[in-house]
């Protein structure tokens, strides 16, 4: 059985010593993860200063409680380490790596996202839905050119916390569209296609501007980001907006 026998560090060793002394399982191996050179997080070459992302950049070990989902239920008694020390806090409990729905791409090392979102600012009082939709396509391209790899990794990861965070981010993206006033802007334009409600139109925009479309067209089909942007703008306008004769 792997145990932590000694702790040495240039700083913070007293914190680790206190953690491994918490209970009987605290000093035992809780996780061993092998991450090869194909890691999408590792290839980004960024340090996020957040365990949720940084741990997926390379191989690592962790002491304390193990993951129940990784061990057959029938083997929990003898094969799952249990401890009050967990490497990530969840479900409303406090901790430095707590995952929050509002935790954004900007905060984990992608400041370009904030610059891309500023393109929406002049549209708040606009009645031109085509301009708004093409701006949305532009913003999606600018964000996913840098972030699509990370988002794809989160969605496809076997780590349940990453998957939860991905889903929370997508739900927050839909809420942000509503809070921005997109339904009212579309209704005010008077150009929504017959039978399409503003809330339905926002749902379509949310679905088409998600990372899946970028991944499929750019990564899998070899489209250029500029071709993706052009297609997305055209598709949104064609599906949602009545042409002016």
Image (cartoon, rainbow, N blue to C red):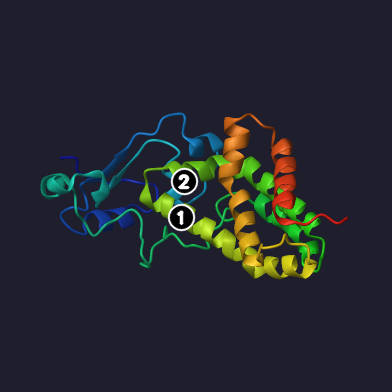
Q: Is residue 111 left or right of residue 55?
A: right
Q: Residue at x 73, y 65 (%)?
A: 186
Q: Residue at x 55, y 52 (%)?
A: 108
Disc 1: which residue? 165
Of residues 163 and 126, the one drawn nearer to the viewer in this rendering: 126
Q: Is residue 151 left or right of residue 71?
A: right
Q: Give the quadrant of residue 147.
A: top right
Q: Quadrant of the C terminus?
A: bottom right
Real-space CA distance between mark 1 and mark 2, rounded to the nearest whole angstrom: 8 Å
- Give the percent coordinates (x, y) of residue 85: 26, 57
Disc 2: which residue? 154
Q: Give the quadrant of residue 33.
A: top left
Q: Secondary structure at mark 2?
A: helix
Of residues 16 and 48, the one drawn nearer to the viewer in this rendering: 48
Can you name the residue that lies furthest to the right here?
245
- Give the percent coordinates (x, y) of residue 208: 62, 49
Q: 10 Å neighbourhood of mark 2: few (<14), some, or many (≥20)?
A: many
Q: Is residue 194 left or right of residue 109?
A: right
Q: Residue at x 56, y 57 (%)?
A: 104
Q: Is residue 189 left or right of residue 83?
A: right
Q: Are marks 1 and 2 in contact (CB under 8 Å)?
A: yes
- Give the percent coordinates (x, y) of residue 16: 30, 53
Q: 10 Å neighbourhood of mark 1: few (<14), some, or many (≥20)?
A: many
Of residues 95 and 16, the one drawn nearer to the viewer in this rendering: 95
Task: Look at the image and tell me whether residue 66 can be seen.
Answer: no
Of residues 70 and 39, the one drawn nearer to the viewer in this rendering: 70
Between disc 1 and disc 2, whose residue precedes? 2
- Give the percent coordinates (x, y) of residue 166: 48, 52
């Amino acid at each position: 059985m792997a145990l932590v026998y000694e702790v040495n560090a240039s700083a913070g060793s007293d914190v680790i010593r206190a953690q491994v002394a918490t209970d009987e399982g605290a000093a035992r191996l809780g996780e061993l993860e092998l991450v090869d050179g194909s890691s999408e997080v590792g290839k980004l070459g960024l340090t996020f200063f957040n365990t949720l992302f940084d741990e997926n950049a390379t191989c690592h070990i962790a002491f304390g409680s193990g993951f129940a989902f990784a061990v057959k239920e029938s083997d929990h008694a003898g094969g799952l380490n249990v401890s009050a020390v967990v490497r990530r806090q969840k479900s409303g409990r406090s901790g430095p790596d707590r995952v929050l729905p509002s935790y954004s791409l900007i905060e984990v090392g992608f400041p370009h996202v904030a610059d891309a979102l500023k393109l929406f600012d002049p549209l708040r009082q606009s009645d031109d839905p085509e301009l708004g939709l093409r701006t949305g396509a532009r913003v999606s391209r600018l964000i996913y050119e840098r972030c699509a790899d990370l988002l794809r990794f989160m969605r496809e990861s076997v780590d349940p916390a990453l998957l939860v965070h991905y889903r929370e981010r997508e739900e927050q993206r839909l809420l942000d569209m509503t809070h921005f006033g997109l339904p009212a802007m579309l209704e005010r334009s008077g150009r929504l296609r017959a039978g399409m409600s503003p809330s339905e139109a926002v749902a379509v925009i949310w679905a088409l501007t998600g990372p899946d479309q970028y991944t499929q067209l750019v990564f899998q089909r070899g489209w250029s980001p500029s071709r993706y942007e052009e297609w997305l703008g055209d598709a949104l306008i064609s599906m949602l907006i009545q042409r002016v004769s």
